Structures are given as structure tokens and as C-alpha cells.
Image (cartoon, rainbow, N blue to C red):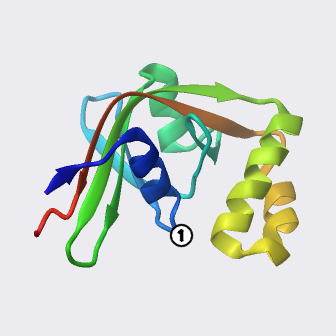
Amino acid sequence: MEEMSGAEWRAFVSEGTRTGKLATVLADGRPHVTPIWFVVDEDLLFTTHATSVKARAIARDPRVCLCVDDQAPPYSYVMAHATASTSEDLDEMLVWATRIGARYMGAERADEFGRRNAVPGELLVRLTPTRVVAKAGVAD
């Protein structure tokens, strides 16, 4: 098993259509984990409706953790502890929602998904990593 560099873990989480598993904390202290579609620049970005469980949890406590893994041998994973911030800027949201649509639905449907998800009531969520654990070849 080896530690991934910053460039390696960013490439790993950006590969294909791997989903992230986002962990937040509910109001009563229970953990909440949900899969998300996301893209990477320096931060990790996704969209969600402002009334979703994850959006409400982030509003209460912006500390989150995102896990992305490879489910095939030799198994690898990235766990990014992060601080979440949100934006309602529809122009910025359209850019990122379109990129997310392209990643998960293909270039031919990117605009459709971008426009569907960059609407009032949605939030653009930016996760700024504070600590990253990134391991490659866990089973080696």
C-alpha cells in the first residue's frame, strides 16, 4: 500500500464516473452518508437542493468527509476531510453542473443536466480539503 500524492489523488477521484460518498452530521448527531456526483478543480464541487438532508447538515456544520474508492483489486481510496461552502450563483452553478453532467451522463447530455440542476433552490457546494488520506494498492 502506498500514499498517493496530491496530483495522484485528484486524478484518482476524477477518473471515470466514480461517485463520492459524502458524510455529514445530522442535527441529532447521527452520521449521514449519501452518494454524490462531483467534479474536481482545486476543490471538489457538486450541486444539491437547498432543502436536502446534506444541504441542511452543511448549513449547520460545514465539516464533511468525502470518500471515493476503487472497488476492484488492488483497491484504492481517497478520504477527503473538508470544509463545505455553498453558493446560489446560478451562472457559476451552470458551469459546474454542466461539467458534472458531462462526467456522469456524457457530453451529449451535459447541457441538459447543467440546465436542469442550475436553477433557483439548488446550491453549488464547494468542498475545500483540510486533510486527505489517499491510499493506492491497499491489497498489494
- Indicate left or right for 109 with 78 as reference: right
**Residue 111 image position (x, y, % from top left):** 87, 64
Taking 20 as reference, is 39 left or right?
A: right
Counting labels gives 1
- Quadrant position of residue 93: top right
Residue named by callout 1: 17
**Dividing the image into 4 quarters, which one contains the N terminus?**
bottom left
Q: Identify the residue at image location x=73%, y=75%.
A: 106
Helix, strand or loop at mark 1: loop
Local packing at callout 1 (Cα closer than 10 Å; few below 14, some 14-19, many 20+) is some
Would residue 71 appear left or right of 20 to someone viewing this image? left
**Residue that appears at 63% across and 69% down:** 104
Residue 7, horizontal then vertical, whole percent:
45, 44
Where is residue 60 shown, x and y percent of the image? 45, 21
Which quadrant of the structure image shows residue 116?
A: bottom right
> Closest to the observer: 54 or 82?
82
Seen at 35% across and 28% down, the residue is 27
Residue type, label 1 = Thr
In the rendered image, residue 64, in percent from the top left (x then y), is placed at 38, 33
Q: Is residue 103 above or below residue 115?
A: below
Q: Is residue 130 above or below residue 5?
A: above
Q: Which quarter of the rendered picture does the C terminus lie within?
A: bottom left
Which residue occupies the foreground of this view, 82 or 22? Answer: 82
Quadrant of the rendered structure where residue 20 is?
A: bottom left
Q: Which of 57/128 is in front?
A: 128
Identify the residue shown where x is 20% and y is 73%.
74
Q: Taking 108 as reference, is 74 left or right? A: left
